[in-house]
Amino acid sequence: MKKILLLLAFFTLNGLFSQDFDKLFSEANNYYKNGNYENAIKLYEQITASGNVSTELFYNLGNSYYKINKVGPSIYNYEKALLLDPLNEDAANNLIFAQRLSLDRIEELPKSALQKFNENYLNKLHYNQWATFSVVLSLLAALFFLLYYFSTSPSIKRLFFTSAIISALLLTTVILITVNQYGTDNRKIEAIIYSTEVSVKNEPTKSAEEAFILHEGTKVNVLDEVDNWKKIKLIDGKIGWLKEEDINILSVF
């Protein structure tokens, strides 16, 4: 009986919290529509701090920061919206506009045909979505095999056997893509420069020689850390060290 009461209490509280977040989100949207972007940001940030996140929330937060010319936070939140939904075209389009406000113009190193294909097609879906495809294909392969096994007509058996083989091959391919995407996403740590201007050092010390300068809104890859220093790499191959307070790690939670 106690377990039942606890479950009822949990779902009741969960429903109340969900209603509160919906109310906050609606209120924040109204502030945004009325041009009160500062208050909208406060409410959006309050929701994100609770962990109740969504691609729409980060997208709206990015828009709010963009309206008050906060380059770093706007790019950061558009990127987070795309982490949750890589197919969010609105976030992708607005990210391009926000990136134009960044002062740094960094030319990317040339990519191989395989890297371009991976970026333009495979990376459009999250590894969870690829995993969903693998489950669907496994069910299809099993279904076609059962239909093949119980069919009596030779022509129908050939059809279902061929379909089962094709489904199995596709399943293998999708599983490999899923594993690759999962490994890539878990190895890759990206961040956005939040400080207006950052002096990137050759070594993780304040007295080290300056390697180059970065500005608010630039995306970097984080390779390593020493104390409160982060080793970063740019898309053009440059590597350096900066203080961790100068960046915000791109993470959904």
Image (tube, rainbow, N blue to C red):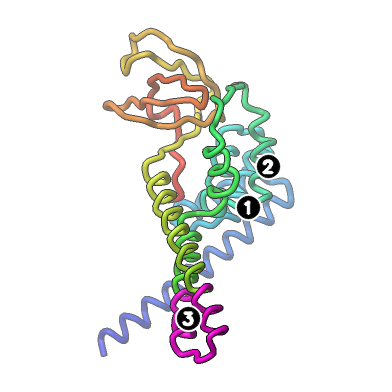
- Return the residue at label 1: 88
Residue 112 versus residue 142 in the image, above or below: above
The secondary structure that most of the magenta stretch takes on is helix
In the depicted view, which residue is nearer to us: 62 or 225? 225
Q: CA distance from mark 3 to mark 1?
A: 33 Å
Q: Residue at x 34, y 10 (%)?
A: 208
Identify the image quadrant of residue 8: bottom left
Label 3: which residue? 143
Cα distance, mark 2 to mark 1?
10 Å
Mark nearer the viewer, 2 or 3 = 3
When the figure is inspected, residue 183 is found, relative to residue 249, above or below; the finding is below
Left of 182 or right of it: where is 66? right
* SS under mark 3: helix
Specify start and end residues of the magenta stretch as a single range: 139-162
Q: Which mark is residue 186?
A: none
- Residue at 69 percent across and 43 percent down: it is 93
Q: Position of residue 214 (x, y in %)?
A: 52, 20
Q: Would you call the spot at circle 3 few (<14 residues within 10 Å), some (14-19), or many (20 or more)?
A: some
Q: Residue at x 47, y 59 (%)?
A: 174
Relative to 160, say whether 216 is above or below: above
Which quadrant holds residue 184?
A: top left
Q: Nearer the viewer, residue 13 or 166?
A: 166
What element does badge 2 sit on? Answer: helix
Q: Quadrant of the N terminus?
A: bottom left
Tag 2 residue: 94
**Was residue 29 drawn as part of the magenta stretch in this picture?**
no
